[in-house]
Image (cartoon, rainbow, N blue to C red):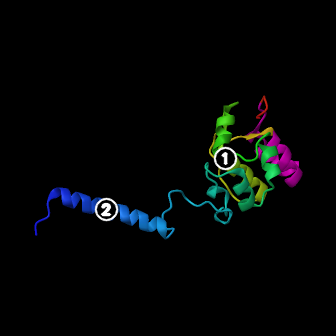
Amino acid sequence: MRLRTPVIAVLVTGVFLLGIAGSILFNLWKTTGAKEASAITSPSAIKGSMPFSLVSQGMGIPLQDLFIAFDIKGKMDILCKEVESLYGFVNGGEIGTDSVRLFAALYTGQPHTPASSTRLPQQAFDVLKKKLGAEKLEPIKSLFISVSGKIN
């Protein structure tokens, strides 16, 4: 028996579709990565696609402290990468995902080497000052910048 090109095309397509259907049926088909708080064991594990609530759980930082530190108001949650779109480049530095990593590192006492342009909003200084004391923040005080305007 000789198989012709149209028959082979139908067979290959059928096997392909049956493979996908089977993996969906047995719950093996995943189109997005699973994000779990237990996977966040260090500030470098924080990714832009992670919501603040996941960072809060994984790093043991109260969610309210994250919201206050980045002056987030009127939102139930926010992705770390959204911080960059809210602040971006301001006053000679950038407030973004690496700022969230730096804040988490300072808050938890874990090591993190930020990019040279990474900055934190002044509100983060206030939150960290309550937790760590102003004297511990003195050497890095230049990383904190005042940002005009509120984020809603």
Residues rendered magenta in the picture = 123-147
Q: Quadrant of the N terminus?
A: bottom left
Relative to the observer, which residue lies in front, 11 or 131? 11
**Residue 140 lies in quadrant:** top right
Q: Is residue 94 left or right of residue 1?
A: right
The image shows residue 130 at horizontal and vertical percentages of: 89, 50
Residue holding disc 2: 14
Relative to the observer, which residue lies in front, 101 or 152? 152
Q: Residue furthest left?
A: 1
Q: Quadrant of the C terminus?
A: top right
The image shows residue 89 at horizontal and vertical percentages of: 65, 33
The image shows residue 150 at horizontal and vertical percentages of: 79, 32
* Neighbourhood count class around disc 2 (C-alpha, 10 Å): few under 14, some 14–19, many 20 upward: few
Q: Residue at x 65, y 48 (%)?
A: 114
Determine whether the residue tagged by mark 2 lies in a helix, strand or loop.
helix
Relative to the observer, which residue lies in front, 35 or 58? 35
Kind of residue at badge 1: Leu
Mark pair 1, 2: CA separation: 40 Å
Q: Residue at x 70, y 56 (%)?
A: 54
Relative to the observer, which residue lies in front, 78 or 93? 78
Please tell me whether residue 5 belongs to the stretch shown in magenta: no
Pair 1/2: label in front: 2
**Residue 124 lies in quadrant:** top right
- Dot label at residue 140: none
Q: Is residue 62 left or right of residue 38?
A: right
Kind of residue at badge 2: Gly
Residue holding disc 1: 79
User: Does 8 appear above or below 126?
Assistant: below
